[in-house]
C-alpha cells in the first residue's frame, strides 16, 4: 500500500510512519515542521520506502504516484500552540482537510481523519460516547481547535455522502509517549520535563480536572485496526482509566524520584473539567483495548525524555 501521512513528522505521525514501514508499506510523510521534528523521522529516512515532502497542507498537494490512503494528522495539537495560532489551527482542520479530501478523491484513495475528544468540548455526558454531540463554546479560546475538528468531521462526511469517498474518523483521547517535543506544552510531557529538570510542576487550577491517558503503542494498534474494517462513523480511541491532573503530577514525581515541587497556576479558559472515553464500540468492533498502564507508559516516556535532555 502507498500511505500518505500529513503531520508525519509529529508525535503520532512519526509512530505511524515507523509502523507502516515495518509492515513493508510505502510511506509519504508530509509535514511543514511547525511543531514536528526531523529528529522524529531521521532514522526512518534511510528506508527506501519512505519519502518526505516538506509542504504546508493549507496549500493543495498534487502527487503523481498512486495513493491508497490519505491519513490527515497535520494540525496544531497542543492547547498552548493552538491558542497562540487560532487561524492556522482552524485552517488545518478546515482548509487542510478539504485539500486532503481533494487529494483522496483525485487518487481514489481512502481518507482517515485524526479527530479529537475535544469535539465533546467541556462534556456534560461522562464518559463520552460517540453519540454525544458535545458542549463546545464556539467563540472560546479553544474553539479554533474544537470547531476545526468538528468541521473536519463534517467535511469528511460530506465527501463520503457526495463523492462516496471511503472515510474513517477517529476521536483520539489524550495520548502520550516518546517523540513528543520537550516544549510540546501538553500535560504529560510538561510534568516529565519539569520533574527531570528539577523545576516546579505547573498544575493549572487545583488539579482536580480529569483526563484519561493512552500510551502511543495502544493508540497506533487501534488506528491500524480501524483501517482494516469498513466503519465510517466516528470512533473513540483512548484509554478509559481516568486520573486527576494532581494524581498524574504525583505519579510523575514518584517515578522520576524528583525533588520538584508543585506550583498552582490559573486554569485556562474553557479547560474541560473531565474527560474519559467510552470505548465500548472500539472494543467490540476492533477487538482492541489498551494494554499499557499509566505507570508503565510513564516509565517508557520518562526514559525517552531522560535521554533527550542528556
Ligand atoms: P504534533 O504536534 O506532534 O503533530 C502534528 C504534526 O503536524 C507536526 O509534525 C506539525 O509540524 C504538522 N503540521 C501542523 N500543521 C501543518 C500544516 N499546515 N501542514 C503540514 N504539516 C503540519 O501532534 P500530535 O499529538 O502528533 O497530533 C497529531 C494529530 O492527532 C493532530 O491532528 C491532533 O489534532 C490529533 N490528536 C492528537 C491527540 C493527542 O493526544 N496526541 C489527541 C487528539 C487528537
Ligand atoms: N495542565 C496542567 N499543567 C500543564 C499542562 C496542562 O495542569 O503544565 C492541565 C490542563 O489545564 C488540562 C490537562 O492538564 O486540564 C490536560 O492538558 P493538555 O494540555 O495535556 O491537553 P487537553 O486535554 O487540555 O487538551
Image: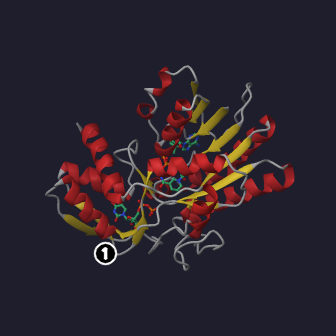
Q: Is mark 1 within 8 Å of ligand 2?
A: no
Q: Residue furthest left?
A: 259
Q: Which of 23 and 56 lies nearest the eye of the viewer?
A: 23
In this figure, which residue is indicated by the disc labeled 1? 206
Residue at coordinates 63% horizontally, 52% vertically from top-left?
93
Residue 38: percent from left, percent from top: 45, 31
The colour scheme is secondary structure
User: Toward which corner of the image does residue 262 lie, by quadrant?
Assistant: bottom left
Residue at coordinates 84% horizontally, 50% vertically from top-left?
164
Residue 80: percent from left, percent from top: 43, 56
Left or right of 147, for residue 141: left
Residue 161: percent from left, percent from top: 83, 56
Q: Residues within 10 Å of mark 1 (few under 14, many from 20)?
A: some
Work out whether residue 81 can be spotted: yes
Residue at coordinates 47% horizontally, 57% vertically from top-left?
290
Q: Residue furthest bottom?
A: 124
Work out whether residue 76 can be spotted: no
Q: Residue furthest right?
A: 162
Left or right of 249, for residue 94: right
Residue 258: percent from left, percent from top: 16, 55
**For the residue labelled by badge 1, is the local secondary structure a helix, a strand or a loop?**
loop
In the rendered image, the vertical position of residue 39 relative to residue 190, given as above or below: above
In the rendered image, the vertical position of residue 188 relative to residue 63, given as above or below: below
Quarter holding the N terminus is top right
Amino acid at each position: 500500500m502507498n500511505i500518505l501521512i500529513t503531520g508525519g513528522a509529529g508525535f503520532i505521525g512519526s509512530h505511524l510512519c515507523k509502523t507502516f514501514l515495518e509492515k513493508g508499506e510505502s510511506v509519504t510523510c508530509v509535514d511543514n515542521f511547525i511543531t514536528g521534528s526531523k529528529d522524529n523521522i531521521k532514522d526512518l529516512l534511510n528506508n527506501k520506502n519512505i519519502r518526505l515532502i516538506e509542504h504546508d497542507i493549507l496549500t493543495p498537494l498534487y502527487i503523481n504516484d498512486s495513493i491508497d490512503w490519505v491519513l490527515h494528522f497535520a494540525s496544531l495539537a497542543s492547547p498552548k500552540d493552538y491558542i497562540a495560532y487560532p487561524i492556522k489551527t482552524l485552517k488545518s482542520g478546515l482548509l487542510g482537510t478539504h485539500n486532503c479530501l481533494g487529494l483522496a478523491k483525485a487518487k481514489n484513495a481512502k481518507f482517515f481523519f485524526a479527530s479529537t475528544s475535544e469535539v465533546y468540548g467541556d462534556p456534560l455526558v461522562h464518559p463520552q460516547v460517540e453519540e454525544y454531540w458535545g458542549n463546545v463554546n464556539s467563540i472560546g479560546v479553544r474553539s479554533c481547535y474544537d470547531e476545526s475538528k468538528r468541521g473536519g468531521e463534517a467535511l469528511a462526511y460530506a465527501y463520503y455522502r457526495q463523492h462516496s469517498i471511503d472515510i474513517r474518523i477517529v476521536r483520539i483521547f489524550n495520548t502520550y509517549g516518546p517523540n513528543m517535543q520537550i516544549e510540546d506544552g501538553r500535560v504529560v510531557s510538561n510534568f516529565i520535563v519539569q520533574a527531570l529538570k528539577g523545576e516546579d510542576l505547573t498544575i493549572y487550577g487545583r488539579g482536580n480536572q480529569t483526563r484519561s491517558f493512552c500510551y502511543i503503542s495502544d493508540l497506533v494498534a487501534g488506528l491500524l485496526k480501524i483501517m482494516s474494517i469498513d466503519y465510517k462513523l466516528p470512533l473513540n480511541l483512548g484509554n478509559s482509566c481516568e486520573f486527576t491532573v494532581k494524581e498524574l503530577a504525583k505519579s510523575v514525581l514518584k517515578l522520576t524520584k524528583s525533588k520538584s515541587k508543585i506550583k498552582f497556576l490559573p486554569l485556562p479558559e474553557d479547560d474541560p473539567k473531565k474527560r474519559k472515553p467510552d470505548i465500548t464500540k472500539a472494543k467490540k468492533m476492533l477487538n482492541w483495548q489498551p494494554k499499557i498502564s499509566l505507570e508503565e507508559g510513564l516509565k517508557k516516556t520518562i526514559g525517552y525524555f531522560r535521554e533527550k535532555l542528556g
